Amino acid sequence: MGFRKDFLWGGAIAAHQAEGGWNKGGKGVSIADVMTAGANGVARRITDGVLPGENYPNHEAIDFYGHYKEDIALFAKMGFKCFRTSIAWTRIFPNGDENKPNEEGLKFYDDLFDECLKYGIEPVVTLSHFEMPYALVKNYGGFRNRQCIDFFVRFAEVCFRRYKDKVKYWMTFNEINNQAKCQDDFEPFTNSGLIYQEGEDREALMYQAAHYELVASAKAVQLGHRINPQFQIGCMIAMTPVYPYSCDPKDMMMSVDAMHKYFWFTDVHVRGYYPSYMMKFFERKGYHLDMTDEDLQELKQGTVDYIGFSYYMSFATHYSGTNPEFEFDYKKDLIKNQYVEASDWGWQIDPIGLRYSLNWFYDHYQLPMFIVENGFGAIDQLEEDGSINDQYRIDYLRAHIEAMKAAVDIDGVDLMGYTPWGCIDIVSAGTGEMKKRYGFIYVDKDNEGHGTLQRKKKKSFDWYQQVINSNGENL
Ligand code: BGP
């Protein structure tokens, strides 16, 4: 009973939300560097490529670029078995289309992975985490352009070859399915680098870009397995289950279509082909995607080894009476779930939903799973004595780990690891704010960029240390 002996306990961050050093070591401008910060939950927006000014949140983030040794030593104190981060594409290919990689960027990640391995911490690496080179967006249109497939595969190959003896666990595109939830405006949540022009069919473009990303992922997976057959390469899905609001069969069908629309990407990553309902959907909508036989061959041969996914919240949907085909539209068919609480940012807190999600994935795919993001973003307050009493974060994580344990012990799912998001306070991807904190470690920096960057353990630091030490027994 309980989690496997080699369960990968750890924590997760992403380069653009933590490193800073946006223009150090030969790094180019990434899409995350040209984002304004939203405020109070408002999502960030592209700024027509205005170069970072002093107030850009990713400008210096928490300077993980300069503090990584200190931070990894703290992760080791918590007993991390693994540590998830991304390789900033623009440290390796500053503009994305160069033929030769930037050696200084490669060296930085050599040093970072060596520091992890020094403590017996396995790096878990995401290749694309909302930080594609802005030059690929500006000069090629991002993943609306088939050429970006080869740019991504070139980036993946350089990383696989360089770190083949240091990194075993990889993922290709972070939350690749997020574009299915926000194609209305460009948001950092998509890896596609799509900036929509006036009058474009955004949905059609989103599906075309998603196809090219999926082909890029499949090619990278095949290449990775050739470079090191020991590699474990996963997809990365944002898992937000969508429940039917009632037992009305119409609500149930809305939930079925919502789950289809949000998670068809997993079918392609895992089974190697598009599910029939998506082919029917493209036909109905008249979307004639650029999808060649060679692409379909690549998808079939480039299936992933595990399902990485993030889990923060669940949704609910109801039949609004306007579409007899029960076609789900995320812009109008979601409804607040009255049976769960929400965070300050409206994220519905649902630990049982994590057990449901583990079962849903395992029932569909029978592949090992890796929860590579889970966490509670909150405005942490410093007490008089300077301590941070984030009991709410402990309660949130404890409830989700209990759900994981039930899924393993009762439902028999195959769960390989757990890396709570933002194991150290970092910049919010959605809003660009520092005040939305997730960490076991507090970082002295505010939304305006002021602060000493001093690191400080929160109450949850010692709690998580004994969770890991007991392999999840002591919660
Ligand atoms: C996920 C992203 C992460 C992280 C997380 C929390 O969608 O993969 O990069 O940001 O969301 O979101 P936020 O930072 O907006 O609170």
Image (cartoon, rainbow, N blue to C red):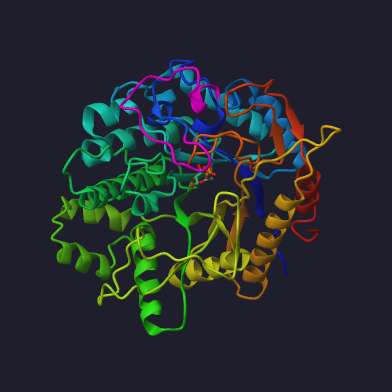
Based on the displayed image, in which of its 4 quarters is residue 81 positioned? top right
In the picture, measured across the screen, residue 184 lies left or right of residue 393, that is left
Q: Which residue is drawn at the image coordinates 34% and 73% (left, top)?
A: 320
Q: Which residue is drawn at the image coordinates 37% and 41% (left, top)?
A: 191
Horizontal and vertical percent for residue 377? 61, 46
Q: In the rendered structure, does residue 128 fall within the stretch colored magenta? A: no
Q: Nearer the viewer, residue 96 or 390?
A: 390
Horizontal and vertical percent for residue 405? 68, 66
Based on the displayed image, in which of its 4 quarters is residue 13 positioned? top right
Q: Nearer the viewer, residue 311 or 322?
A: 322
Horizontal and vertical percent for residue 345? 55, 49
Examine the residues drawn in magenta and state their main secondary structure: loop
Vertical placement of residue 180 versus 324, above or below = above
Q: Quadrant of the C terminus?
A: bottom right
Vertical placement of residue 97 versus 369, above or below = above
Based on the displayed image, in which of its 4 quarters is residue 152 positioned? top left
Observer able to see residue 314: yes
Vertical placement of residue 59 versus 332, above or below = above
Q: Which residues are magenta?
A: 38-60
Q: Which residue is drawn at the image coordinates 23% and 56% (left, top)?
A: 296
In the picture, measured across the screen, residue 306 lies left or right of residue 298, that is right
Total residue callouts: 0
Q: Nearer the viewer, residue 375 or 66?
A: 375
Q: In the rendered structure, does residue 56 fall within the stretch colored magenta? A: yes
In the picture, measured across the screen, residue 232 lies left or right of residue 284, that is right
